[in-house]
């Protein structure tokens, strides 16, 4: 019996040691593989992931610089150009810092650096060219006004021939025309004024010639302005070519960085796959050895069953387990890393979509989906500035649905909203694309009509009023008739001319007159009323 016990103990010890060693090998291999893969992943992230994010940001900042330089060509005053220059300088510093931080990760780094430096220099050239263009345009406009004043004086003096000649000259330099298509020089002006030489005094003719074709005349200033327009057009073409080059190189840089990142990520995945196969092979080997040991020790296991009570009474229970480190977590880790690139793209799209939605919410009314008061006031201020510069009249119309409170009380707020929606649709169908129609509050609306005089605006308002009066709103076979009162005005000359909001007071007075004198009518400011 002691001999049997000795063999039993020896076999149990051998099998336990064997399985323990194999379990330890599997466990240590799994731990070593996991640590190595973590190091590989961290190395890829440190070397490429952060730089990829920075390069993406570099692309965004460069696009902002390109947009700002393009905006320079649309500038109408020196102040706009100054702001664009400040903005470009700020973004250029960010681009330079990022480029210096990751030169090895940028495709065609030297070419990109050269292009960005050229872009920075070109922005200064564009700014200078646009400032010169604006200054020359102001000079031509000043010359034009001087000729207008001179013409007015001659008209008051009864100089009809001089006045007619000046009219023909002014047509050559009308600032409202597309001057880029004209070819005006001194010879054209001389041909117009030469017949006056025999009808006016020599001094008067010399004064007229100096005004029109002298060294500081409108002809000279206009030719300089035309030349500057051509220079700006050439600069636009050059800038367009530079922009395309930068976009191409920057796009190649981003794609190259992504390709390097994905390549290294693929290598990590390949290591994961190899380690996974190795661990499965090691596990399979352990299972095969264990099965062989168990098969060889069938007699031993039967005898262990016979002496179970002895083991339970005095010996510790032995559990034979093979430690297996599953690879699912590692696979998930790799999937998450691969998902980073997709996350970046999804975030870019989400930001663009959110910006569009936010812009729409900021500028539009919730119920009618037309513009709101805030958007209208911004456009009103811009139109008034244009009026102050070019003296092109504009009109305002304030519209109010008559007795709308009674409609809500009688039919309910839901049908009241349907009336408002139908009303806005009808007005919108009558508008031009350049008009701005907005809801002020409740049943109050306002319409801005640029470059429109009061007579034409009055025709449009009467057409709207007549259509509203003649055609009720139909909701679920239910007809709801209503009318609209309209106040109309053409921009007024007042002492506080700079304040566009003062014009709202006049159109409000016209609307109050329409409401107080019977409703369902159009009233013009200064008591010009159309029933």
Image (cartoon, helix red, strand yellow):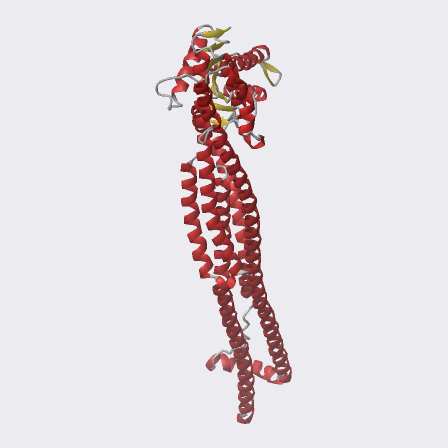
Q: Nearer the viewer, residue 367 or 320?
A: 367
Residue 243 in percent (x, y) is at 55, 48
Q: Nearer the viewer, residue 82 or 166?
A: 166
- Residue 172 in the image: above or below residue 47: above
Q: Which quadrant of the figure has residue 507?
A: top left
Evaluate whether residue 331 shows in this view.
no
Quadrant in which the N terminus is drawn: bottom right
Residue 105 in percent (x, y) is at 51, 62
Evaluate whether residue 19 shows in this view.
yes
Q: Nearer the viewer, residue 320 or 87?
A: 87
Q: Seen in the image, is 467 located left or right of residue 60?
A: right
- Residue 108 in the image: above or below residue 313: above
Residue 95 in percent (x, y) is at 45, 54
In the displayed image of the protein, which residue is found farthest to the bottom? 3
Q: Seen in the image, is 21 located left or right of residue 211?
A: right
In the displayed image of the protein, which residue is found farthest to the left? 495
Residue 221 in percent (x, y) is at 47, 32
Q: Seen in the image, is 459 located left or right of residue 78?
A: right
Q: Residue at x 35, y 18 (%)?
A: 495
């Amino acid at each position: 019996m002691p001999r049997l016990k000795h063999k039993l103990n020896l076999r149990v010890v051998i099998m336990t040691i064997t399985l323990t060693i194999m379990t330890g090998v599997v466990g240590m291999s799994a731990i070593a593989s996991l640590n190595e893969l973590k190091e590989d992943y961290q190395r890829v992230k440190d070397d490429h992931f952060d730089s990829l994010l920075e390069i993406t940001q570099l692309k965004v900042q460069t696009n902002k610089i390109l947009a700002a330089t393009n905006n320079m060509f649309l500038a109408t005053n020196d102040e706009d150009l100054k702001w664009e220059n400040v903005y470009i300088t700020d973004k250029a510093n960010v681009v330079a810092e990022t480029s210096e931080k990751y030169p090895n990760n940028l495709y065609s780094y030297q070419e990109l650096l050269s292009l960005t430096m050229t872009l920075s220099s070109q922005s200064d050239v564009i700014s200078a060219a646009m400032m010169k263009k604006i200054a020359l345009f102001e000079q031509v406009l000043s010359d034009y006004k001087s000729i207008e004043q001179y013409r007015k004086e001659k008209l008051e003096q009864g100089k009809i021939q001089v006045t007619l000649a000046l009219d023909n000259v002014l047509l050559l330099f009308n600032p409202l025309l597309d001057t880029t298509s004209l070819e005006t020089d001194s010879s054209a002006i001389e041909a117009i004024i030469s017949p006056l030489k025999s009808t006016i005094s020599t001094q008067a003719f010399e004064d007229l010639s100096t005004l029109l074709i002298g060294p500081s005349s409108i002809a000279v200033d206009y030719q300089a302005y035309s030349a500057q327009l051509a220079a700006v057009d050439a600069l636009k073409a050059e800038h367009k070519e530079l922009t395309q080059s930068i976009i191409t190189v920057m796009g190649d840089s981003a794609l190259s960085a992504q390709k390097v990142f994905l390549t290294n990520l693929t290598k990590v995945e390949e290591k994961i796959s190899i380690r996974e196969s190795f661990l499965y092979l090691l596990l399979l080997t352990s299972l095969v050895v264990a099965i062989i040991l168990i098969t060889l020790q069938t007699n031993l296991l039967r005898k262990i069953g016979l002496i179970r009570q002895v083991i339970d009474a005095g010996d510790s229970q032995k559990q034979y387990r093979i430690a297996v480190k599953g690879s699912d977590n590692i696979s998930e880790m790799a999937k998450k890393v691969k998902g980073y690139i997709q996350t970046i793209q999804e975030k870019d799209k989400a930001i663009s979509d959110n910006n569009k939605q936010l812009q729409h919410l900021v500028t539009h009314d919730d119920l009618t989906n037309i513009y709101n008061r805030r958007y209208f006031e911004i456009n009103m201020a811009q139109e008034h500035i244009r009026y102050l510069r070019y003296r092109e009249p504009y009109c305002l119309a304030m519209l109010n649905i008559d007795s709308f409170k009674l409609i809500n009380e009688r039919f309910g707020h839901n049908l009241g909203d349907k009336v408002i929606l139908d009303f806005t649709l009808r007005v919108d169908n009558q508008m031009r694309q350049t008009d701005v129609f907005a809801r002020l509050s409740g049943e109050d609306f306002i319409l801005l009509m640029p470059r429109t005089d009061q007579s034409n605006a009055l025709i449009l308002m009467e057409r709207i009023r007549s259509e509203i009066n003649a055609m009720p709103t139909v909701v679920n076979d239910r007809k709801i008739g209503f009318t609209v009162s309209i106040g109309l005005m053409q921009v007024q000359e007042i002492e506080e001319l700079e304040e566009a909001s003062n014009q709202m007071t006049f159109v409000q007075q016209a609307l109050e007159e329409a409401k107080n004198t019977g409703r369902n009518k159009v009233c013009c400011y200064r008591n010009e009323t159309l029933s």
